[in-house]
């Protein structure tokens, strides 16, 4: 296990992006090892979600590089980055609200469903085989998140905490190597957050997943993240082991002011 | 009584043609969030393609129809790639005006090639016996039988074209519903229509899905054009514009973006049009159709099956 943890899953080198006159992220360096739980924190507007958007191909970085599992994915379109193995959830939940819970997960399995549109229209045997296999796989994922009872409900009708879980399930369905969670605990009460922490641990252990998360809830951050990067005004303020970083006077100042 | 049945059946037949066209409007709106006003003119292109193919001696009817469908499908996809895709992030008004421009472009190209005079379109069911004839002299109703010249005038005739329009439309609507709700490409369409960004980040090919939507919509328009030109056997460069607008009304009527809505809206519109032609005034029938639209929109602004959007305060 230890040996495996040394190989980097994600290497971010000197990553920057400029919007007009604003350098939203400036020279970010970050290395995340396989199987690590890594946190990206910082005050509002520090550029955390912008980093996620660059990692997933929504924004093209102005300079710098992103290496995923040894492969350079800098500036690639979102769809191919997803195929290369990055999946994410969103700060403001973006489920397909008018589709069923099951269909949301199946949307994540889109690229792992192997039949053509023609086979679907003509309902050839492969259509039924693949639909059956994919549905079973989706149900398995839903079971992990204890959502199997709600499979046929519309995603919009789930309570908030379960919507967050469904987003994680949908992201996992794309079979990623690296999972990005954008403020997974936002809007959750302490009980839900505690449960979420268990879920994240469980996902990392049972899916052998590398996880990078943005979070403001310090209880969650100190509870599960092994290493942190702190961003402030687009620049790295501190980096390293969680407890050390959180006790860094620079970090405390950035959060609480002088 | 029999005349009412006849008007009703003709209305359903016309309505199912509107529904096929409305499906194209509503699917494109649902996915690309744009009103494709060139959609009506795709019908015209389809009609002229089939007309031209059938007027060559070697081309059988079925092949002409297939050629028409292929031409429209390709045309729809090309229009999207060339005219609409570059404007994907532009304000909706720019896209709307482009669509109107494409519509005029197609009309004027057709004017240039075929001239402005209406041509006579040979029905794809030409020479076929009527689907159903009913007499009032005690004989049993006849299916698929030609009426002998010396027979008494039947009290109800349902033509083969009418029968074809309804059957073909119903089959297509069932197939389309199954396709969208039961296959991965169909579900990808639903996902893209809800949230393009999230769909893309789940590995769904958004551009491909939009192309597929235009392809399906245009293929449906081609089928509609064959059915329409067979029932009302004329074609001119302006053939597509009125049915296009009516189908748009049907889509709005049913709730734009909703697929069952387009089907119901289309059929209702056809029935209303035929019944008002028969019982009120044939000249006022179009006015009545649009009046009904206005009333429906006042009562239910999102259409019959449209989702009610609650404004957040």
Image: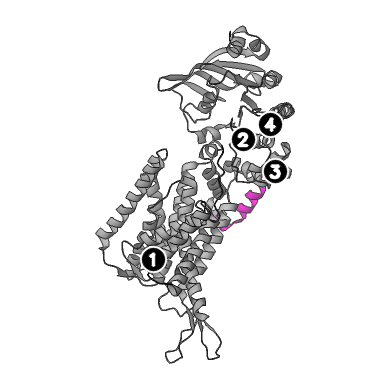
Q: Is residue A177 above or below residue B179?
A: above
Q: State the separation of the CA atoms marked 3 and 4.
A: 16 Å
Q: State the separation of the CA atoms marked 4 and 1.
A: 55 Å
Circle 4: element type: helix
Which tag, 4 or 2, sits closer to the chain's start?
A: 2
User: Mark 4 = which residue?
Assistant: A207
- Residue A171's label in the rendered image is 2
Report the magenta residues as a range: A121-133
Marks 4, 2 in one chain: yes
Q: Is residue B218 above or below residue A46?
A: below
Q: State the separation of the CA atoms marked 1 and 3.
A: 47 Å
Circles 4, 2 touching at the beta carbon (< 8 Å)? no
Residue density around tag 3, few if under 14, some if 14–19, many if 20 or more, within 10 Å? many
Residue depicted at x 55% and y 47%: B190
Chain to which the residue tagged by mark 3 belongs: A
Q: Quadrant of residue B50?
A: bottom left
- Residue A139's label in the rendered image is 3
Residue density around tag 2, few if under 14, some if 14–19, many if 20 or more, within 10 Å? many
Report x, y in % for residue B277: 43, 72
Q: Between tags 4 and 2, which lies in front?
A: 2
Report x, y in % for residue B207: 46, 42
Q: Between tags 3 and 4, which lies in front?
A: 3
Examine the structure image and report whether residue B242 is included in the region drawn in magenta: no
Circles 1, 3 touching at the beta carbon (< 8 Å)? no
Q: Is residue A256 above or below residue B170?
A: above
Q: Quadrant of residue B118?
A: bottom left
Marks 3, 4 in one chain: yes
Is residue B132 shown left or right of residue A200?
left
User: Mark 1 = which residue?
Assistant: B64
Q: Nearer the viewer, residue A191 or A62?
A: A191
Q: Is any part of residue B243 visible from this angle?
A: yes
């Amino acid at each position: 296990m230890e040996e495996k943890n040394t190989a980097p899953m994600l290497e971010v080198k000197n990553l920057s992006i400029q919007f007009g006159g604003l350098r939203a992220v400036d020279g970010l360096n970050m290395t995340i090892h396989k199987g690590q739980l890594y946190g990206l924190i910082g005050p509002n507007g520090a550029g955390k979600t912008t980093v996620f958007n660059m990692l997933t191909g929504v924004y093209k970085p102005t300079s710098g590089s992103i290496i995923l599992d040894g492969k350079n994915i800098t500036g690639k379109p979102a769809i191919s980055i997803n195929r290369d193995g990055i999946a994410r959830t969103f700060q403001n939940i973006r489920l397909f609200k008018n589709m069923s819970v099951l269909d949301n997960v199946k949307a994540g399995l889109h690229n792992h469903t192997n039949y053509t549109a023609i086979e679907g229209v003509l309902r050839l045997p492969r259509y039924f085989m693949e639909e059956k296999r994919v549905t079973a796989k989706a149900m398995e994922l839903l079971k992990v998140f204890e959502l199997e009872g709600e499979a046929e409900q519309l995603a919009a009708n789930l309570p908030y905490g379960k919507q967050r879980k469904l987003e994680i399930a949908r992201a996992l369905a794309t079979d990623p190597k690296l999972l990005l969670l954008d403020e997974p605990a936002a809007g959750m009460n302490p009980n839900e957050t505690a449960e979420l922490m268990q879920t994240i641990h469980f996902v990392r252990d049972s899916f052998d997943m590398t996880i990078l998360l943005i979070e403001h809830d310090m209880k969650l951050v100190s509870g599960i993240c092994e290493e942190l990067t702190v961003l402030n005004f687009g620049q790295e303020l501190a980096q390293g082991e969680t407890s050390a970083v959180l006790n860094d006077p620079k970090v405390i100042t950035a959060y609480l002011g002088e | 009584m029999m005349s009412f049945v006849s008007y009703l059946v003709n209305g359903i037949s016309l309505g199912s043609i509107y529904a096929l066209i409305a499906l194209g409007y509503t699917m494109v709106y649902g996915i690309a969030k744009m009103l494709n006003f060139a959609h009506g003119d795709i019908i015209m292109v389809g009609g002229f393609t089939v007309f031209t193919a059938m007027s060559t001696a070697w081309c059988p009817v079925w092949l002409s129809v297939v050629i028409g469908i292929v031409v429209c499908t390709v045309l729809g996809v090309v229009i999207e790639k060339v005219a609409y895709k570059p404007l994907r992030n532009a304000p909706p008004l720019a896209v709307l005006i482009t669509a109107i421009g494409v519509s005029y472009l197609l009309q004027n190209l057709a004017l240039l090639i075929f001239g402005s005079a209406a041509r006579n379109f040979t029905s794809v069911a030409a020479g076929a016996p009527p689907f159903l004839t009913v007499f009032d002299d005690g004989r049993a109703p006849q299916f698929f039988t030609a009426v002998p010249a010396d027979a008494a005038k039947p009290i109800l005739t349902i033509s083969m074209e009418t029968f074809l329009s309804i059957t073909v439309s119903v089959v297509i609507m069932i197939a389309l519903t199954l396709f969208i709700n039961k296959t991965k490409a169909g579900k990808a369409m639903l996902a893209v229509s809800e949230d393009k960004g999230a769909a893309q980040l789940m590995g769904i090919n958004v551009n491909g899905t939009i192309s597929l939507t235009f392809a399906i919509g245009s293929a449906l328009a081609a089928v509609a054009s064959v059915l329409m030109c067979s029932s009302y056997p004329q074609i001119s460069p302006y053939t597509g514009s009125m049915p296009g607008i009516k189908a748009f009304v049907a889509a709005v009527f049913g709730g734009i973006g909703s697929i069952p809505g387009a089907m119901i809206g289309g059929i209702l519109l056809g029935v209303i049009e035929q019944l008002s032609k028969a019982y009120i005034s044939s000249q006022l029938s179009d006015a009545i159709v649009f009046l009904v639209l206005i009333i429906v929109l006042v009562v239910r602004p999102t259409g019959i099956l449209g989702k009610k959007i609650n404004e957040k305060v």
